[in-house]
Amino acid sequence: MASRSSSRWPRFFTRLTWALFAVVLAAVAWRPGGEWTWGTVLHVDGFTQGMALVTTLVSGVVHSFARRYMAGARRLDRFYGRLFGLTLIVLGLVAANHLALFAAFWAAMGGVLAGLIGHVRGWPQAQAAARYARRVFLGGSALLAGALALLGWAAGTTTLTGVAAAAGTLSTPVVYGAACLLLLAAMVQSALVPFHRWLLSSMTAPTPVSAFMHAGLVNAGGILIARFAPVLFADASVMLVVAGVGGVSALVGQAWMLVQTDVKRQLGCSTVAQMGFMVLQGGLGFVAAAVTHLLLHGFYKAYLFLASGSVVEHTQPTSPSDEDAGPSMRSGVVALVTALAGGALFAALTHKSITALDSGTLLVGFVVLAVLHATRSVVRRADLAPTTRLWMVPAVLLPTVGGYALVYNGVSGLLHDLPAATAPVELSAGHWILAAVFLGAYAALEWGAPYASTRLYVTLRNTSHPVSATLLTQRDQYQAH
């Protein structure tokens, strides 16, 4: 049983987190997008405000949820101390301006997160997951430290703002070297292929930790891309590589998700895919779109993890004899028209040109693809009449696209002082190849390729396995928190 002193910590840290959220909310409302600098140590801008607002809100929700979920668990004082400490670390990371301080917060984030993954001391699988994550995070921190050292030396500065200002003067070898190290560090933190196993092995973490991790900490790769966009965007070929890396992870993560049978592992593979899509948007020159994706995904994934225990309760059996439950020619036409209308609506609201043939065209194309994908969940609702399903497609999805576009515009306004927040590039042959491969692979997944080929199915299952030492092969191996 938890000691009396330990039982005070959940309430204390929960209230403190909500107080932090109130302070951040008041600061954003008072001066949205405003800048504030403290020497070479801290630099607060619109990006800092947005990330701080989301971090404290999600952390407050997770703290409140954990008070019920973790009730009666052992070592609650350590758990809440780490959870609150992790919140402060993320706040420090998004406000840090000194290169050494940024690297220190990055390393601390990985160390504390690994400790939370292995919260249950007597659970061998949880400890194995924590050890593996700690090694991966140390590697990622070393990559980031190398990039920061190279940039600081080449730019003659010790601050992030100084590096951003000097990005245009850096030599090509420095840009390539630093971009490579930064991209690898982002891939490690955001669990992109092939650094995904730490995330898929972390399912032994308490559900509140999984929610906070998938909602905010995995997104740190996006923070890295946003902060160092001037370096990554200094060369068009680097941007194309960033987009390609993101596209591969988006497709592979989606394919892995289709073959999972475990709810939390499905969510983990979904996070790999979503982080890939976030990086893809950054590689196209739209940091504002990547940050918008980062923020919305954070809220959505936190909800999914916190609600994962009720998935079985909310699943309703459907009648296999309902012939109208599947897509028809009529529903396909409605879906296509809605998707095209959604793309046009997004382009109009965000002032993206469809005919300019720059990377903004691809961004609009991905919105069309996303709307087309979302129509499936509506047209396959067997509990609705066929006519109802048809009119619900545009009635639900077009306002959703409009809302997304407005959030995108709001984030763009908040990031007005962030260098290269929106930097569309002219489409090259590489972009067209990337778009064609992405579209073809996406279509294959939608048409059931993982199930049509036994070899592909087995390959996807094998490559999405977590580290073997973290696997639960028997029911009695599970230990409560």
Image (cartoon, rainbow, N blue to C red):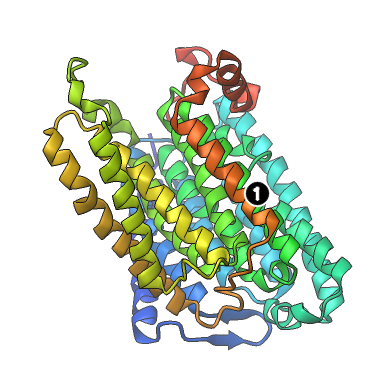
Q: Residue at x 55, y 17 (%)?
A: 453
Element marked by disc 1: helix
Given residues 376 and 199, the one toward you in this image is 376
Query: In the image, 461: left or right of 80?
Result: right
Name which residue lies at 82% across and 60% down: 146
> Could you say which is closer to the camera, residue 222 or residue 381?
381
At 53% from the left and 19% from the top, the residue drawn is 472
Disc 1 residue type (three-letter): Ile
* Residue 344 x/y as whole percent: 36, 63
List x then y, in percent, for residue 211.
42, 45
Q: Identify the residue at image location x=67%, y=81%.
A: 161
Q: Nearer the viewer, residue 230 or 147?
A: 230
Point out residue 275 in the picture as x, y percentages from the top left corner. 54, 49
Is residue 191 visible in this depiction of the protein? Answer: no
Q: Position of residue 9 (x, y in %)?
A: 39, 53
Residue 217 higher or lower than 416, as above or below: above
Residue 123 relative to residue 49: left or right: right
Residue linked to disc 1: 433
Please tell me how many numbered marks the rendered image carries: 1
